[in-house]
Image (cartoon, rainbow, N blue to C red):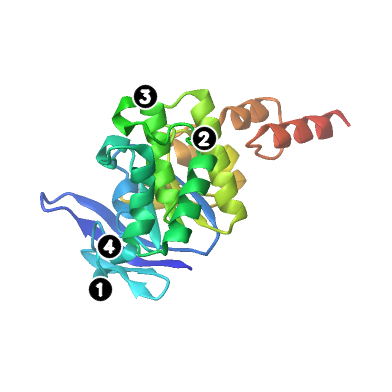
Amino acid sequence: MNIEISDLHFTYPSGVQALRGISLTIEAGEQVGIVGQNGAGKTTLVRHLNGLLHPTAGEVKIGDWDTRKYSVAKLAARVGYVFQNPDDQLFSRDVRTEVAFGPKNLGYPKEQVEALVSEALEMTELADKTEANPYDLSPTWRKMVAIASVIAMDTPIVIFDEPTTGQDAASVARIANVIRVLRERGKTVITITHDIDFCAENFERVIAMSQGRILLDGKANDVLGQEEILAATYVDPPQLARLGRRLGFKETVRNEEEFLAALKNMSA
């Protein structure tokens, strides 16, 4: 299911123009990281994908659906959205009930709901916390509950808004594994993040935004190598990319595997 955004403009009631002519296509199964400073328009952009916001001008289509013609509840069958703050998302008395709410609300049969819930709990390592009240858990685990509740809806498109903010290394690794599994299942994953190293390690396509416009959009290695343009978005290239450049690598590297391969080529 493709996402088609055509000349998208959005102005808030306060008069702030948040998006200024965004056009892009995200194909089914793509893994896309969106980076940029606060106020660049990242969250405003992705909130158009599930109908939380409607264009001031332009068009957003999820598959063959124009988002202006469908409710948030209808779009929830196609687009799952994990909020930055899990406390904005959680409301049930226990973890299992919370994770089951989405697929039940979408009208899935009971057996399918049970299977999706169990799978989401296993993927997020929450299987031993099903009876706990989400608000009795640490912020790290509340984030995982929020992620599990969206995964269980089995939507073709999943959006993560700053998933690694406030998370420890173990939780970041869990989130990376969730994204890996979603990728293997052919899901489209879109992530807003300030964690450029996480972005580099987990996404093949990167979009850099500034002041409501797209400055860069392409393969992660190409985008993350544009140090001067990234500076305009107040984003530094990943640590390994910066180290590789100082070592004289000809190509931009974004993870340990690429770094070691480039180092080996230099030594050959």
Could you classify mark 2 by the number of other residues whose Cα lies within 10 Å: few (under 14), some (14-19), or many (20 or more)?
some
Q: Which of marks 2 and 4 is nearer the N terminus?
A: 4
User: What residue appears at the point 70 percent right and 25 percent down from the top-left corner?
Assistant: 247
Quarter location, residue 86: top left
Residue kind at label 1, given as amino acid type? Lys
Query: Label 1 belongs to which residue?
Result: 69
Placement of 141 over or under 177, stated as above or below: above
Asked if residue 13 lies left or right of residue 250, the reply is: left
Local SS, label 3: loop
- The mark closer to the camera, 1 or 4, is 4
Query: Label 2 belongs to which residue?
Result: 125
Placement of 196 over or under 186, stated as above or below: above
Separation of marks 1 and 2 at Cα, in angstroms = 37 Å
Separation of marks 3 and 2 at Cα, in angstroms = 14 Å
Residue kind at label 4, given as amino acid type? Ala
Q: Which of marks 1 and 2 is nearer the N terminus?
A: 1
Query: Tags 3 and 2 in contact by the CB under 8 Å rule?
Result: no
Query: Label 3 belongs to which residue?
Result: 138
